[in-house]
């Protein structure tokens, strides 16, 4: 992995970020001005770039423009002491990954840099993946239909609409359509229209002239210009604002557009591929999507099957993702036992292939042995796993039998092997995060409180005031918690 570049004329800022990232085992390289960083870009590139916005000489925005012109996929985080709206807009207009105002919390800064790092590694993985591995895997009949469609479209420039649930691999299909088209040697530019604020999306698509708005210090090429002679992939097209739909329709109709603030028409020779997980027909009926644009985009439609419709591909995908994850971490790939593969094949994974990939990454890091069994899976995937580790049940669920862990036998051995209940809690949290579950803190916090209160009530034979004293909380607090958590069996003294 390449180092993270820090560009700031303030030596103390550079020092603080260097030390914080070193504690995370992340390599850094620092520059005191933008000019030195620009010169270094001629010979090397970072994994993530962190830059101050106002420095002597060239500004952070000048550096941002230079980076985005040559390396559009490189995440750039802009840091500034001038936390005004104009600077924020200018940073995002220039394609910044995120905007961070001084003084900043160092932990939040590191977390932001980690997010940018994950994005960069994802981009690198897609761009420079192993050449001996197909870009899309699948042997199920539904996927074979997709492959046949890609083959039929290989020599065509026709507009394609890709539909399917989130995580089914719509961008991979778009990249395959580009790779096997006459435009394969030209740029492939991807843009998630739902991930960019409405006020910035127009400039992101069409670019802007210098002085078009406050903070537009330089002329900027939009995604249509970046994709000239190549392919522009617009993901989550169903979320595009209505007024921008009109501008997109005009480009598709006559092949011309204007930069924001510009008066000279620009010619666009771009193949447009779009994708959505939404029902565009329903959005048209609801007045949220232009019908004429819908017909322009829906020339050829490719529907990607969910993982539930191609369960026979799960073993193939699991093996691929485990090898891929192990290669990225520099470790030996884990192997799945037959019962574990059978277990995974029977799961309903709402996040589809993306969730399965995240699960394989979790297994590579967290599973204890080289051969992975069902018991090594994240605890929330199986009730048996949760019961074996004696984690507190969710409110309303029945607790594990009291003797399951009290006899000092296999249950306690498993508990000790996992590093005690703190280790098990960490495993539970890691599994939930890997599976994309939200509100993890609230869910686990409620389970923890529920388990403590239930145990105390059992110890005091249901007397809640006595239980409150034993737990070291107030009587009003335990009464409120019992009501919030739906705990039965409590009684007044």
Image: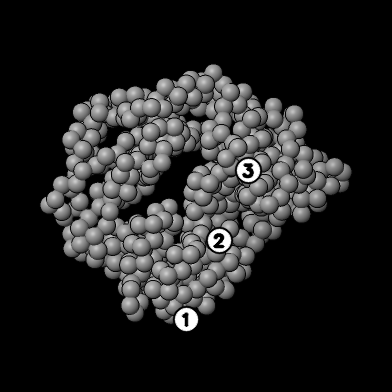
Q: Quick one: SS at disc 3?
A: helix
Q: Which one is closest to the eye, mark 2 or mark 1?
A: 2
In the shown orientation, is residue 449 left or right of residue 240? Answer: right
Q: Quick one: SS at disc 2?
A: loop
State the residue at coordinates (36%, 69%): 60
Mark number, residue 2: 2
Report how far apart the C-alphas of labels 3 and 2 lie in the structure.
18 Å
**399 or 459, nearer to the observer:** 399
Mark number, residue 324: 3
State the residue at coordinates (32%, 49%): 226
Asked if marks 3 and 2 touch (Cβ < 8 Å), the reply is no
Q: Quadrant of residue 66?
A: bottom left
Mark closest to the chain's N terminus, 3 or 2: 2
State the residue at coordinates (59%, 64%): 26
Q: Which quarter of the image is occupied by the N terminus?
A: bottom right
In the shown orientation, is residue 450 left or right of residue 384? Answer: left
- Badge count: 3
Q: Residues within 10 Å of mark 2 (few under 14, many from 20)?
A: some
Residue that label 1 marks: 11
Look at the picture and state if 26 lies above or below 480: below
Could one spot residue 8 in this view of the protein?
Answer: no
Report how far apart the C-alphas of labels 2 and 1 lie in the structure.
22 Å
Report how far apart the C-alphas of labels 1 and 3 lie in the structure.
39 Å
């Amino acid at each position: 992995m390449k180092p993270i570049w820090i560009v700031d004329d303030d030596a103390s800022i550079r020092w603080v970020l260097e030390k914080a990232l070193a504690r995370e085992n992340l390599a850094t390289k620092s520059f005191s001005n933008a000019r030195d960083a620009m010169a270094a870009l001629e010979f090397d590139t970072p994994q993530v770039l962190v830059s101050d916005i106002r420095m002597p000489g060239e500004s952070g925005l000048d550096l941002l423009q230079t980076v985005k012109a040559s390396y559009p996929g490189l995440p750039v985080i802009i840091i500034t002491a001038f936390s005004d709206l104009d600077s924020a807009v200018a940073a995002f207009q220039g394609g910044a990954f995120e905007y961070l105002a001084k003084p900043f919390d160092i932990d939040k800064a590191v977390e932001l840099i980690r997010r940018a790092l994950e994005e960069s590694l994802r981009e690198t993985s897609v761009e420079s993946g192993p050449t001996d591995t197909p870009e899309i895997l699948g042997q199920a009949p539904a996927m074979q239909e997709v492959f046949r469609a890609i083959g039929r479209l290989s020599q065509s420039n026709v507009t394609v609409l890709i539909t399917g649930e989130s995580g089914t691999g719509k961008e991979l299909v778009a990249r395959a359509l580009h790779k096997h088209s006459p435009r394969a040697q030209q740029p492939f530019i991807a843009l998630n229209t739902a991930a960019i604020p409405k006020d910035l999306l127009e400039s992101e698509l069409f670019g802007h002239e210098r002085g078009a708005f406050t903070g537009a210090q330089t002329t900027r090429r939009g995604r249509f210009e970046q994709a000239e002679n190549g392919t522009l992939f617009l993901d989550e097209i169903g979320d595009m604002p209505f007024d921008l739909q009109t501008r997109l329709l005009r480009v598709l109709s006559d092949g011309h557009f204007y930069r924001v603030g510009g008066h000279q028409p620009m010619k666009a020779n771009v193949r447009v591929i779009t994708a959505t997980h939404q029902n565009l027909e329903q959005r048209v009926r609801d007045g949220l999507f232009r019908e004429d644009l819908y017909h322009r985009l829906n020339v050829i439609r490719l529907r990607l099957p969910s993982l539930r419709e191609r369960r026979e591909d799960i073993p193939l995908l699991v093996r691929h993702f485990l090898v891929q994850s192990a290669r990225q971490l520099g470790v030996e790939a884990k192997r799945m036992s037959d019962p574990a593969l059978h277990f995974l094949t029977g799961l309903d994974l709402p996040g589809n292939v993306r969730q399965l990939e995240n699960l394989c990454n979790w297994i590579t890091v967290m599973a204890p042995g080289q051969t992975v069994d069902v018991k090594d899976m994240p605890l929330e995937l199986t009730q048996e796993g949760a019961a074996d580790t004696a984690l507190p049940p969710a409110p309303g669920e029945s607790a594990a039998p009291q003797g399951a862990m009290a006899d000092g036998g296999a249950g306690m051995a498993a508990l000790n092997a996992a590093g005690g209940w703190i280790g098990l809690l960490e495993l539970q949290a890691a599994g939930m995060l890997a599976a994309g579950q939200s509100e993890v803190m609230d869910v686990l916090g409620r389970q923890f409180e529920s388990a403590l209160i239930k145990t105390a009530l059992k110890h005091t034979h249901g007397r809640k005031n006595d239980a409150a004293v034993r737990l070291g909380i107030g009587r009003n607090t335990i009464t409120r918690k019992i009501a919030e958590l739906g705990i039965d069996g409590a009684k007044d003294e």
